Image (spheres, coloured by chain):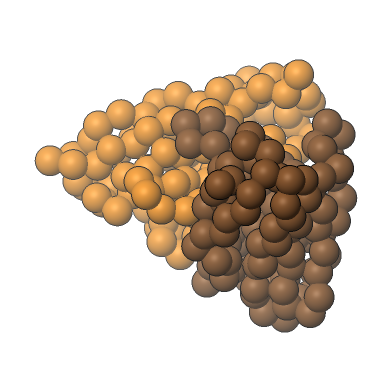
Amino acid sequence: QSALTQPASVSGSPGQSITISCTGTSSDVGGYNYVSWYQHHPGKAPKLMIYEVSNRPSGVSNRFSGSKSGNTASLTISGLQAEDEADYYCSSYTSSSPVVFGGGTKLTVL
Amino acid sequence: EVQLVESGGGLVQPGGSLRLSCAASGFTFSNYEMNWVRQAPGKGLEWVSYISSSGSTIYYADSVKGRFTISRDNAKNSLYLQMNSLRAEDTAVYYCARDLGIDYWGQGTLVTVSS
């Protein structure tokens, strides 16, 4: 049940695009199309932003997009806005447990 | 509107027990798998436990196996987490979360294990 690997932090200026990576193995990210991404503002409930690698729930801005290549999934946020500043977590279904999370990435909007 | 409201957190001594509850509303609870997820202070999210919609299938993270017990009461639209033999490292905000591909989360309840 090892955590998926994410960069600890990323930053970008308003209007720019950033990408957060999420690296696992063939037993989780690479083996299933069940990767999700969550936005978490401290003190609030995490919010689902992307499910099943690249699908956006209703109400989530189309500035958020997801993809996957091999054992690495990615979340791209385009047209960065101040309100996007938050912690972001990936998760995946795994062959050994229902869910594993990434270590989280702190996004700073400069 | 989907709502998940956790309760039961608090301060407990090492070795003690605590039972968390999660009240669900706004959806047909008995149709959904459920999870408990926690976040220790300054740390990331950690999946704790899963239970199928009927309660017949259960999984635990290795870190809590043998100490925590997940259960549900579909008649009461409620999810539970019985936590025994608590350790300092169990200190965290505990979230109730809906479905295998988690789509909704509660606001969380804080559990502090300290003497």
Q: Is residue B17 left or right of residue B93?
A: left
Residue A31 percent across, percent down from the top left:
78, 75
Coordinates of residue A103 in the picture (x, y in percent): 52, 61
Instruction: Give the answer, above or below, for where A56 lies relative to B22.
Output: below
On the picture, is A34 further left or further right than A94?
A: right
The image quadrant that residue B11 belongs to is: top left
- A79 or B13: nearer the eye? A79
Regarding residue A77, the answer to whether it shows in the image is: no
| Count of numbered circles in the view | 0
- Locate residue B63 relative to residue A40 in the image: left or right: left
Q: Is residue B87 visible?
A: yes
Q: What is the residue that sits farthest to the left in this orientation?
A: B115
Place of residue A81 in the rendered image (x, y in percent of width and height, measured from the top left):
68, 39
Residue at the spot 79% in from the left edge and 26% down from the top edge: B28
Counting from the top left corner in percent of width and height, residue A77 is at 74, 51
Of A30 and A83, nearer the camera is: A83
Q: Please, is residue B100 above or below residue A41 in the view?
A: below
- The quadrant of the image that shows the N terminus of chain A is bottom right
Chain with colour brown in the figure: A
Say if A97 sits above or below A14 in the image.
below
Q: Residue at x 53, y 31 (%)?
A: A44
Q: Classify residue B33 by image quadrant.
A: top right
Which sits in the foreground, A103 or A87?
Answer: A87
Identity of the residue drawn at 62% across and 53% down? A12
Q: Quadrant of residue B113?
A: top left
Which residue shows up at 82% across the image and 53% down it?
A65
Colour seen for chain B: orange
Instruction: Answer left or right for B11 relative to A36.
Output: left
